[in-house]
Structure formats: structure tokens, C-alpha cells
Image: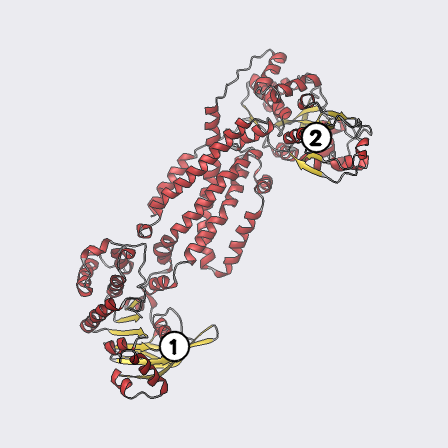
Amino acid sequence: MLNKIKYFLILCVAFVSCSKQSDQIIVSSKKFTESVILGEVIKHIGNYSNTNIQHKDQLGGTRVLWNSLLSGEIDLYPDYTGTIIQEILSDRSISNEEEMITELAKLGIKVAGPLGFNNTYAIGIKNKTEKISTISQLNEYPDWKLGFTNEFMDRNDGWPGLKERYNLVHKDVTGLDHDLAYRGLESGSIDVIDLYSTDAEIEYYEIEILADDLDYFPAYNAVILYRNELEKLHPEFVKNLLSLKYSINESKMVKMNSRVKIDKEKEDVVAAGFVKSIFDYKVEINEETMFTRLLKNSKDHLFLVLISLFGAILFSIPLGIAAYKIPQLKQVILNSTGIIQTIPSLALLVFMIPFFGIGELPAIAALFLYSLLPIVRNTFLGIENIPVQTRESAIVLGLSNFTILKKIELPLASRSIIAGIKTSAVINVGTATLGALIGAGGFGQPILTGIRLDNISLILEGAIPAAILAIIVQWFFELSEKIFVPKGLRIN
Amino acid sequence: MIQLEEVTKNYSGKSAVKNINAVFEKSQTTVLIGPSGCGKSTILKLITCLVNADSGTIKIDGENLITINLRDFRRSIGYVIQEGGLFDHLSIEDNLKLASQNFYINEETINDRIEQLLALTKIENGQLQKFPSQLSGGQRQRISLMRALMLDPEILLLDEPLGALDPLIRFELQTDLKEIFTELNKTVVMVTHDLSEAVYFADKIILMKDGEIVQSGSPEELLKNPTNRFVQKFITAQRSHVE
């Protein structure tokens, strides 16, 4: 039995052999197209400057990126002055961009830019029949449904401040994904959305922008935030970044957004065109085939699932045994693993960021915690359900507690334990798709991009392999029953 | 010889046995009988140390049980329960060998012992590779008895060993068991609720009710001189269906 487990573990470690390089520059971007394009621009410039640069795209919202930048998980990312002043440094009452630069410098962060365009928040409607042109006039339509991005709902410079400044009376206000908001507006299920002034969709969907007549929204000049040490380590790269100042005006940015969102061009292709125009540098686009993408996503996804699942197996089985053997611990163990299970998976992922930063590690930690309950519970129940007579027979035969556990209880509970592992594995495969939100890659990556670009085939490129993997995992554990469940229990 | 002196055991405030005084003579078969819940199985659990007495003493050949090394003591007892208590995940052979291997007895000795016991319990060699779920109830009880006898224990404790069998198989096994007991000459304590079975096996019968001994003695004594109305009623109730 021990030998079998050994082989099993070796097999799985071989499966997930995966390593990370250390002298890399990590550029990151937020979960919307403009940010991803700027991230790609930075990546191409990194390549042009002969650095080893990687772009971790679509890493959730401002907070995740800012904290990752501070902790050094990432080296740089594009952001906007309004966001930095109103949101990131909101507790320092900064009044202009010079002060902002000084405050950032104190934190070891430098600013490249401004890039040349102001992507301010704006409020948009799609209603041709009503006569409305300013945000103030919204109060004439108190029954309208407002659908704002989740980030806008929470930000200091978002809905709370807007509502106060304009004394808005609307009750029906919901949070949703930015890319879904346009579709909601188009279908008429919402009447008012927030948007970015450089969004490609404004023209495409013929959206009317309401004038900010009380001057609520500050300027959101695009800049690049980077860590101080980048200047020492990669001076050439930073020099090239700084040369981007005023190189992208609003119409240029809207055009680039439009090429990606409306014309369905790839971000890196669009970014490459821009970089070529500035540096006279022909970017080699590695045309990623669906197959190579699938291979990479599969590898990332398996890495997350296998490591977290094996950690969970190694940890949960002893925990389940302890819950049975030590009555005082039973409730503590079962309740605490139960409570973890009730935390929404997305929240659990985000909770892990302060401890483990971004990328695979926090995702693995969250998936590990998520996998505990089914295995712990099934181990506990598998042992508890052994008939008392069987246990008494073993005791009277003179077997020690350890021998009873090893030779009687665990083999008799094996079917139940494997069923628990199977449940955990299938949940794990599904939940791991959320890992993409914190930079862990996997099948969630194409799903995330697919939602952002309204591209069904990309969504399916993540969803179908994830479903197939879940089936394979299920099948694998059914097969493993033949190895781990003793023959005597498989005979009817 | 097993002696119980003023032994009391309570389960969550309710007494299972009260101030029991009993002697189980060496090389004799003593049968504990009585209605369900009378405490007869508890006595076996007390002797096997599956439960500990709240008060009183249990002596094995004059030595207090609590001073005896438990591992050594369990090596000297064999225990058979109603459904056999075989381990479903192990083959018959592994079920038989488990305890012997645990006591580091060499493989050759173990195999010789299995050969002897196969003959004694009338089990064919071919059954050894099977699993408990592939055997009939009667065969399982024979294997369970074999397992109990593997280490050649001094004491054999049987808790309703034939209780779950259908009448024909039960009759056959009764005959074989009686032969085995006679041949091995062990100290046997058997629990049953069936009077005819008790009379068939017993050198001595102990009749219990509500955790207390109502009467004990040879089967003849019990049948001829019931000491009170309960004994009388118990005997009549069990006989009336036959007569």
C-alpha cells in the first residue's frame, strides 16, 4: 500500500515539474482592454530593450495591482492619475500631479508619462427619445436603472461621490462587469452605465455621454507606475518607457481599443503596430496557435489542481483520522473546514493575496483550503461507519491502535476517502478557472479574455477543456479505486 | 479459570450488570443465557477488556485482570461474534494470519496451524483465497472460529456465534462445534438466548435477567429445580414451541 502511494506521488510530481525564472521583469495590467493593450506595449518595449519581460495580464482591479507593485510581485503597470490620487493615495489629500509624484516616490514608486490621453470616467446612456444631456438631469428620471462596474461602485471617485455631488435619488443601482454593461445597455435591461472616455464601444453602440456639469470626475491621465529599482537594473528599458511621454493621444487610444474590441485584432498585434511607429522596431509576433495556448493553459491548470489537491490529500486524511480518534477535536476540525467551504471562492482567492502575493501561490493556497472539507469529512465518516463489531474483533485479536488504523480502518474507509478526493478534485478543476483573476493562468485565462472581448469561442476555449479535465479527473479516480480499494471490498 | 467478583458495569447511568459473582471453570463450557439486554454480552466484553468494570474484580487463574499485560492476555483468548467479525477487505488467509503476523510468529508455523484448523473446522483449502463476502454465513462462522483458534488460546469466548444462521446450517455447526470443544478441551464461555443450544453445549448454565444472575448450575439442575418463577417461565416459554 505505501509503495503504491509512493509511485502515485512520484508520478504526480513529475506531472507538475514547473519552474519560474528570477531576473524577469513582470508587467501587469487590469481587467479591461485598454490596460491590456498598454501592458502589451510595455512588453514589446521590454523586448526591444533586450530584457526578459513577461506580461501577466488581466489581474483584477486597482487594489490587487497596486499591492502587488508595492510588494514587488510585479515591477510595473499602467494606471491613471485620477485613480492614483482619488483611490490609491486617497488618505494623503493630494491636490495635483506633482504632489502625487512626490508621494509615490516616498513609497519607492516612479511615474513614466503622462502618456498623452485622459481616460476619464464618464456616464453614458442610450436613450434617443428623452431630452437629457447632463448628469444633473438624471434626477428627472428617478426610475432609471443604473448599472455600474463593481470597482466604480466602491471607489472614492466612483458612485458614492457621484451620488453625493449630484444628489442622485436613484434606488435601482447594481454592480456588474464592465464588458457586460454595454450589452445590458444595448438590450435595455439597464439605462445608465459608467464608462471610460476612450472606450471603443462609445461610438460602436452610439452611446450618449452625459456632461459632467458639476465637474465631479478628475482627470485620468494615463501613466506607467514602476518600481524604483528598475532604473538601476534596466536603465535602457526605463529610458525607452520615459520616451513614451505624450506619445498616445486620445484618438490614438480609442483607435487601438477599437481595433481590439470591434475588429477583434489581438492586443499584442495592435500594441506592436504602435511600438513600431515610435521606435522603428519590428516586433516579432509569436503567432500563438490555439494548440500552444491550450497546451500552456492545460499545464498551468494542472499545476494548480494537482499541487493543491495533493497538499489537501496529505493534510486532510490525517485531519479526518484525528477528528475520529480525538473526540475533542472532532467539532473543531469538521466545523472549521466546513466554514472555509462556505467562503465564496472568489473571495477566498483574494483573501490569499496579502499572504502569498499574486500568481500561482495564492491560487494554490485557496484551492488547497477549498479541497479540505470533502476529504476530511469522507475520511472521518469512512472510519466512523466501520461496524463496532469489526473494530472490537480487531482489538480482541491483540492488534495495536496503529495496526488497526493501518490494516483495518484505512482500508475499510478507502472507498469513502477516494470518493471525497474525487469530489474535491472535480470542484478544484472548476474553481481553478477563477485563478486567472489573480494571475495564476489556466483555463480561466481564455474565459476571462473571452468575456472581456465578447468572444464566445475564446470562452469555450477555456470552458470545454475545463469540463473535459473534470471528466478525466473523475475517471482517473474511478480507475484509482482499483488500486486503492482492496479487492475484498470490490466484490459483490 | 475465570472468576467475576462483585462486578458492576453501568452504561450512561444505567446498569448493564450488577454485583455479578460467577466462576467459569477451566476446560468447561459455560453458557450465559437470558433475554436480550440481560447483560450476558457485557460479561464477555468485560472479560475481553473491551469495557472496564466500574467496580469488582475479574481474575484469570487467580490473577487480577487489571495487573495482566493486555497484549499477552489477548493473545490467550479467542473471540467469535454473531456475524463473525471478519474483515471484508482481507482474504480468508489474511484474516487468519493477521494476528499471528502481528505477534511475529514465523510463516511456517502459521501455515501448519492453518492446515490443522482447516481439518478441524472442515474448511477446504481452496477457500483461503476467497473473501468473506464470497462465503456463506456458516462458512464465515467456521473461519471466524479458525481465526479465534489461530494462536491456540486458553480461553474461547463466543457471543451468539450461531445466532444469524438458518436452522439447518445451525444444527450442522452445533454438532461440529461441540466436537471441537470436546477435542480442544478449552475454557469456553458462550452467550446464547436459545435454551436448547445452551443445554446442548453447557457443562454449566448461568441464567441472567436485568444484569443479575438468576440461577446457575448444570443444565439438569436448571431444568429440574428452577429456583423461581422467572426461571420456570423462561424454560416453559422456550420449550412450549417444541412440545
B154 relative to A331 in the view: left or right: left
- Residue at the spot of label 1: B38
Q: Label 2 crowding class (10 Å Cα cut-off): few <14, some 14-19, many 20+? A: some
Q: Position of residue A281 (x, y in %)?
A: 58, 12
Chain for numbered disc 1: B
Q: Quadrant of residue A16?
A: top left
In the displayed structure, A131 sits above or below A363; it is above
Q: Amino acid at mark 1?
A: Cys
Report the number of numbered marks. 2
Question: Is residue A423 shown above or below B149?
Answer: above
Badge 2 amino acid: Leu
- Front label number (2 vs 1): 1
Mark 1 surroundings within 10 Å by alpha-carbon count, few (fewer than 14), some (14 through 19), many (20 or more): some
Above or below: residue A345 compared with residue A217? below
Residue sitting nearer the eye, A189 or A466: A189
Residue picked out by circle 2: A104
Q: Is residue A356 left or right of residue A380?
A: right
Q: Position of residue B35 (x, y in %)?
A: 36, 77
Measuring from the top left, give residue A357's x and y in whole percent. Answer: 58, 37
Q: Are marks 2 and 1 on the same chain?
A: no
Q: CA distance from mark 2 to mark 1?
A: 83 Å
